[in-house]
Amino acid sequence: MTSPDDIRFHVLDNGLRLAAERLPEARSVSFGIWIEVGSRHETPDQEGAAHLWEHLGFKGAGSRSALDIAKALDLFGGHSNAFTSREHTCFHARVTTRHLEEALDILSDIALHPAPSLEDLDREKDVVLQEIAMVEDDPEESLMESFWSELWPGGALAHPILGSPETVRAFDLPGLEAWRAGHYRPERMLVAAAGGLNHDELFAMVERRFGALAPGAPLPEPPRGDYRPAVLLRERDAEQTHVTLSFPALGAADDRRFALAALNAVMGGNMSSRLFQEVRERRGLAYSVYSYANSLSDRGVLHVCAGVDPERTPELLACLREELDRLARHGVTAEELDHARDHLLSGLFLSLESSEDRMSRLARNHLVLGRAVPPEETAARFEAVTLDDVSRLARELLDFSRAGLGILGPTVDPAWREAIRP
Amino acid sequence: MTSPDDIRFHVLDNGLRLAAERLPEARSVSFGIWIEVGSRHETPDQEGAAHLWEHLGFKGAGSRSALDIAKALDLFGGHSNAFTSREHTCFHARVTTRHLEEALDILSDIALHPAPSLEDLDREKDVVLQEIAMVEDDPEESLMESFWSELWPGGALAHPILGSPETVRAFDLPGLEAWRAGHYRPERMLVAAAGGLNHDELFAMVERRFGALAPGAPLPEPPRGDYRPAVLLRERDAEQTHVTLSFPALGAADDRRFALAALNAVMGGNMSSRLFQEVRERRGLAYSVYSYANSLSDRGVLHVCAGVDPERTPELLACLREELDRLARHGVTAEELDHARDHLLSGLFLSLESSEDRMSRLARNHLVLGRAVPPEETAARFEAVTLDDVSRLARELLDFSRAGLGILGPTVDPAWREAIRP
């Protein structure tokens, strides 16, 4: 699908990585500036720092004002953005090929040379406080953030990516800048690109903008905290009750990740999955029901989520328990595995048409595995998954002695915790 | 950007339209079965019928069971779906070229030959009731649906697309089937496709599946209701207050739609827009603030939306009023128009890379204008917009004697309606 020459990788003298894939037919280029810094790199008094820095670069960077930046990014067509996760901050864009250099110029300024004033900081704190309020007002998102915190007591994985209103209000510029200087190191940066690009030109562009960054080992990561099977029951006036289950699962580089993808597809990852069929199609219990694997670099969680009529919460809990117990006990069928595999292969193939997906795939493979992975290799790994791999993983992961339970709804019943009794 | 031969249009004997664009480099095909039937075609006792039929086809169609359908769509990679709007129902998919015929087979069965049992209907009512509950629990979506209803008193435009719990519960199969038979007519159908396709093969596939549909004029549309400048103040316990303004605007075929797109871009359609800069960047009032034009076939509404700290609601209202009044009074600057134009042109160009966007663009142009519109023509129309076009439109549309106001938050103050006093 890609000739070897189309993908190149290079490390600058200061340790910054550049991975690029040329797609000869593309009219646009997608690129991302990835920094291995996220909420898990924050100590308790810095909770929300990574996310706030994602915002602050847009308030002014290098010699540009906030308005200069907004105008330029709008001119490129409005496909520029940024996100912060537990482990990464990413500034990314899709632009026409002729805009590549200017877009890289602006996003690298945002990432490397943010220059917020004290007033900018105060304004942006207000914006982030509204973002926190918005998440809090979304029942499912609110449950997922508060439940996640319960899963990692006392560690840096626990806190919300956005921070809390208290930590966000307390930030001052010198403290934020010191934190940033300790983490935004070229050794932790990767520039990834895919699309209509010329490798040598891109290399020169990246060298010019990132080459002068001084190397220096990043600050150590705070203790992450260990998973515990938490139970969180939250009352909130609402039409629906939201339920989530958690099981400790796999880190992103785990060799069993292909079997996990198949297991998830059979379990709740698509329309023909067991949970979708049983919970939605046969019982009409939920509109939204799904499972997904959240894989961090060193650990992961398998989640099941559903939104249900509050009165039918016990039925949903019993149904989830029965389905997952059966999956753990009897595994999947050969027909289910074949189907999951074909689903995953089609999805992989379709994703290869998008330069954004290609860029993201290239970046994540480099960040997690330290190399580009040809689609053929991924396809072969899906093909190689056996029935035994998936059934063994189901037995190991769907273990209710390690299950967590989160519920948010108009009434909650302490007896519901029985649903995850081992 | 496209050679004339790549786009073809054909009308079957029964009136069904087929529009297709060949993209020689694409590995996938996007297609949609569009039916000109939506919530505005429902009488009061049928509210939610169009949306329920969007669901019911997936419960079983032709000789396929719900599970057969789900399995097949998952196999294609999971990019198949459906939606219902005020005016349209659409069943759509992106699939690899080799899956095109099978995918078309399944989605045409779902669209044309749904065969739900009584039990299927009961289960799917429960699913839709949960979908309604989910929308109700989202403060912004809930405000937008209830506010929209207030804008069109007594007409078919008023009611929610999903219907109400009462109308959904009351549906019976014979009534639903009669409604469907009256509206799912080939004259109201358009199949659109874009991607790696062969025109003659596609024509044959569509003829085989849609050619036998009996023609027959669809039922007349119920009275739509006329716009009124409504005020809706709803109290709900929440962290944020959501505010929306409405102004009657343009139908989708209106010649001034290019000027409206430019006006919207300057007003609140992107990051450098006046509202984003003033409300978010300078005042830190909101995380989310934007405007957009909702254009139906014969009429439209220009909306402004923001989520704000409840205590700062009066400041937000004053700020919106001041910005919109200034825009109405003084229009936009030449620099703003240039910028809006370039933003829109870049967005158009980037959208042409996606077969989904191409299919959707092709379909909408046929549904609204009765023809395909070459991208060059759209670009030329954006280029031709003058300062006077935009300023005149701003003056005409941003008229507070016709403005509506919707607010949902923990406390509401009747005095806030003064914010839209003419």
Image: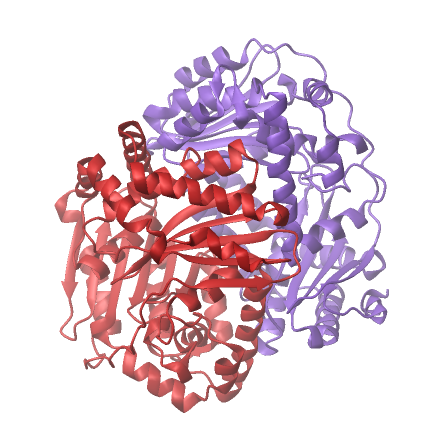
Chain colours: A purple, B red
Residue B419 locus on image (x, y percent): 47, 51
Q: Is residue A159 left or right of residue A112?
A: right
Residue B179 locus on image (x, y percent): 34, 84
Q: Is residue B216 left or right of residue A179?
A: left
Q: Is residue A220 left or right of residue A279?
A: right
Residue B1 visible in this rendered orientation of the protein: no
Q: Residue at x 62, y 55 (%)?
A: A138
Q: Residue at x 28, y 69 (%)?
A: B36
Q: Residue at x 16, y 70 (%)?
A: B12
Q: Residue at x 59, y 26 (%)?
A: A120
Residue A175 visible in this rendered orientation of the protein: yes
Residue B125 locus on image (x, y percent): 53, 79
Residue B258 locus on image (x, y percent): 24, 44
Number of on-image labels: 0
Q: In the rendered image, which quarter is residue A354 located in?
A: top left
Above or below, A229 against B110 in this view is above
Above or below, A206 against B112 in this view is above
Quarter occupied by the N terminus of chain B = top left
Above or below, B258 against A27 in this view is below
Above or below, A179 against B301 in this view is above
